[in-house]
Image (cartoon, helix red, strand yellow):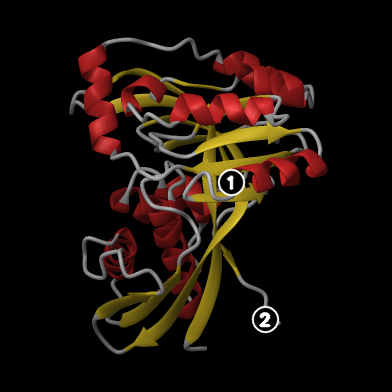
């Protein structure tokens, strides 16, 4: 086998709580993260040497600034294998959205390389490699519904998100993650994030409780003029709850029926840069089945 494709789901944050700083000055977080049915497709081909990257998206870097290239470099370093690869990324996830599209690509690359080079790494080993590439990469490898803490390095089991439908809206302008955190530090203003109550709602399979307790400490710090209007319009269109994901700028609404979600998606089409209907999924980066 010299070529393999991985489907790598995007993520949303049901909650994001900034709980402190570590001794390096990195923000410590407590989050409920969920992979969703919006996928990147990462195809990796073996090469004797060098790591190259191409994509259908011209706006992403193709050198070591791309987290997928960085992850591949780390894979070869970790395993000691003298080899190379070409990575092709078919992008579907918007950038600067808070949905970890780049981290999904990196996760997909690690999973693909493990299969191609028959290294039989455990998920924990793949996460160890991924953590050096980016803080969201370990979660994008394991996926599902997880409580993620620390700087993204502590991943704990969590009850699955109840069945529902999601409408994800990406506004015209993205948000820089470093800028959002820097602004958060400047503002010094917290949002009430009741993560334990959110987990209890999921344990009770109560989607209305989940919608009630979704919250994101970075919403104000992201300073996107679109966040609050989109949240309000999602509620007006039938969402039972709405919140910004990650550091923004994407905003999603939770719907208790597919019909309502599809109608809301049609409402937003043309009003935002992109809009998607999605569902929670219980996996991370996964080798695509051959058709």
Residue at position x 34%, y 77% in the image: 54
Dot 2 or dot 1, earlier in sequence: 1
Residue 181 left/right relative to 125: left
Q: Position of residue 160 (x, y in %)?
A: 70, 36
* Callouts 2 and 1 close, C-beta under 8 Å: no
Q: Pointer 1: residues within 10 angstroms few (<14), some, or many (20+)?
A: many
Judging depth in this view, the residue of 152 and 241 nearest the camera is: 241
Residue at position x 49%, y 85% in the image: 3
* Residue 35 tag number: 1
Q: Position of residue 203 (x, y in %)?
A: 74, 24
Residue at position x 35%, y 43% in the image: 174
* Residue 290 tag number: 2
Residue 115 left/right relative to 97: right
Judging depth in this view, the residue of 283 and 177 nearest the camera is: 177
Judging depth in this view, the residue of 90 and 20 nearest the camera is: 90
The image shows residue 258, relative to residue 75, as above or below, that is: above
Q: Position of residue 234 (x, y in %)?
A: 62, 31
């Amino acid at each position: 086998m010299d070529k393999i494709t991985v489907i790598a789901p995007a993520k949303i944050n049901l909650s994001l709580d900034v709980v402190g700083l570590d001794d390096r000055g990195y923000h410590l977080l407590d989050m409920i993260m969920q992979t969703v049915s919006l996928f990147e497709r990462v195809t990796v081909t073996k090469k004797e040497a060098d790591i190259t990257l191409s994509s259908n998206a011209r706006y992403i870097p193709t050198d070591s600034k791309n987290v997928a290239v960085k992850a591949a470099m780390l894979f070869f370093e970790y395993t000691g294998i003298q080899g190379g690869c070409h990575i092709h990324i078919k992008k579907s996830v918007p950038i600067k959205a808070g949905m970890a599209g780049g981290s999904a690509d990196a996760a997909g690359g690690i999973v693909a390389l493990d299969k191609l080079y028959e290294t039989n790494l455990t998920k924990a080993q793949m996460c160890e490699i991924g953590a050096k590439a980016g803080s969201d990469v370990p979660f994008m490898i394991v996926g599902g519904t997880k409580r993620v803490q620390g700087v993204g390095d502590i991943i704990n089991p969590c009850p699955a998100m109840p069945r529902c439908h999601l409408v994800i809206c990406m506004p015209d302008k993205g948000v820089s993650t470093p800028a959002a955190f820097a602004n958060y530090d400047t503002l010094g203003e917290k949002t009430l994030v009741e993560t334990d109550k959110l987990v209890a709602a999921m344990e009770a399979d109560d989607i209305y409780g989940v919608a009630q307790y979704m919250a994101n400490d970075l919403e104000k710090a992201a300073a996107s003029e679109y966040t609050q209007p989109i949240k309000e319009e999602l509620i007006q269109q039938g969402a039972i709850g709405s919140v910004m994901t990650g550091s923004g700028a994407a905003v999603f609404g939770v719907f208790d029926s597919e019909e309502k979600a599809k109608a809301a998606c049609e409402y937003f089409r043309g009003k935002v840069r992109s809009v998607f209907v999605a569902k929670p999924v219980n996996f991370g980066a996964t080798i695509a089945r051959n058709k």
